[in-house]
Amino acid sequence: MSQATATEDAGTFESYVEAVLDVLAAAPDRPVVTTGEGVVVRAADLHHRVLRLAGELEADGIGPGCTVTLLTGNTVEAVVARYAANLTGARVVSLYEGMSPATMAHIMASVDSSLLLVDGQRQRTARELQELADVPRMLSLGPGDFAEDVLARAAHRPARPMRGRVGPDDHCRIGHTGGTTGIPKGIPATHGPLRRGLDFRFENAGVPPRLLVCTSLSHIAGFLVDQALYQNGSVVLRHAFEPGEVLAAVERERVTHTWLLPPLIYQLLDHPDLATTDLSSLTRITYGGTAASPTRMRRAAEVLGPVLYGIYGQSEAQLITTVSPAELLRTGPGGRLTVGRAAPGVEVVIRGADGTDLPPGEPGEIVVRSPAAMPGYWKQPELTAQVLRDGWVHTGDVGCLDEDGYLYIVDRIKEMIVVVGGHVYPSELEDLLLGHPTVAQCTVFGTRDEDAVERVHAAVVPVPGQRPSLPEIRDYVTTRKGRLYAPDALHLVDALPLTAVGKPDRRHLADRFPG
């Protein structure tokens, strides 16, 4: 990321929302957002909506120190609500689709949420939350029969500028890790790194960028929206990822940039419309978030061309490494694809269990020092002390560096499956299985039997017309990797379940196939 802005150095901090609003105000007639329904929102309209809602929230007692929770989909109202809340000085928490209402209520209680804003995409969930105790006051972002429409109320308010409510070290959001069950960990992010991040220009994202959002705005897609708008670009929103709709949107809207997780790229590759869709406007697909299959990514590079740019990061450390199309197919130990080299201003080392730095080629825990690292987990000092030590973030990922500083991910330490005779890293086995001619997609996960012995399972989406058997898969794996890696169970599925952020949902699979 770039160095601190001049305004921050001078002690007159400009928040990321203020910076985006200034760009919108400079070209009021410019189309900036196309909604999932095809409605085009111009810069002046977005600018005024944010200021009016911010004024309404402030009049309602929302400001510095408050937490506003968003239960929203990929809508323009979600963007307006986040900007407005942050503009007042409040921090924002997003509830992810797929969480149970009980988990949502626990999160809101843990972050001391004083207000829940709900858009038209999530009203049914809001009604379920209303049945629980201790849920904060709700307001609707648009018409709804469960709460007052705060946007209608704000529409009568003048769009007055609002500045100076936050400093660089103030919280802008609290993100949450974890999947669809359990209680995720809260990770605060501060305004300083977010504002500096607006100045970072992703290579070949378009000048100006036209960003397609088809994954949750609650995650990296939301930051990419901020960046695109600040860089005089525009945004096309889709409510969810559907490969045919994504391909059509790229062609119709002349999209230059989008963010996808590798499993979503694979769905594009497998879609019959790919061969007949004009993707000539698309100059960058940023991918990351989960391990990428060498076999599938080689195919993606062949079909899509030099548009694939990988990033590796974590909520605790933000952006860690980047990899360009020219480096995409660089492989390391075991044929793994590199996730690139350290991003500007970031240091990456590999450490052993004893805390010593390991030489190139030796696998160990990836440890990171970054100006964008989290200040610590929300209200969890003991956990913070485990992960954040002497300014270094201990990622919990296993990896190694080569002589040229390229990083290779082996797996998550916690996702390692301990079996008799050693351990299995799911991503290694997934990469191998994707080379089998009958396997289109797969996810590897572990379960414990009645004796607490871990068993290796493979959930496989077969190639159309194929039906692989467990003996066939075991023989394939044993020949190439050894009997240790051969799965104990094979589950043929129509589609792989994904978490709210698009990662393979191993926990869901383990619950579905516990034996």
Image (tube, rainbow, N blue to C red):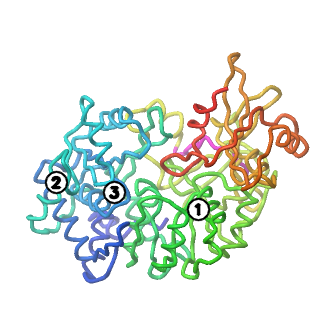
Cα separation, mark 2 vs mark 3, equals 32 Å
Q: Are marks 1 and 2 in contact (CB under 8 Å)?
A: no
Q: Residue furthest front?
A: 465
Residue picked out by circle 2 = 149
Say which label, 2 or 3, has the lower sequence index: 2
Most foreground residue, 191 or 105: 105
Residue at left 79%, top 45%? 468
Q: Position of residue 88 (x, y in %)?
A: 21, 56
Residue picked out by circle 3 = 168
Up/down of 89 relative to 475, above or below: below
Q: Residues within 10 Å of mark 2 (few under 14, many from 20)?
A: some
Residue picked out by circle 1 = 287
Residue 312: quarter of image? bottom right
Q: Quadrant of the C terminus?
A: top right
Q: Amino acid at mark 2?
A: Asp
Up/down of 393 relative to 455, above or below: below
Up/down of 493 relative to 414, above or below: below
From the viewer's perspective, is 328 left or right of 69?
Answer: right
Say which label, 1 or 2, has the lower sequence index: 2
The total number of labels drawn is 3
One can see residue 16 in this view: yes
Q: Position of residue 259 (x, y in %)?
A: 52, 64
Magenta extent: 391-401
Pair 1/2: label in front: 2
Most foreground residue, 192 or 7: 192
Residue at left 56%, top 54%? 313
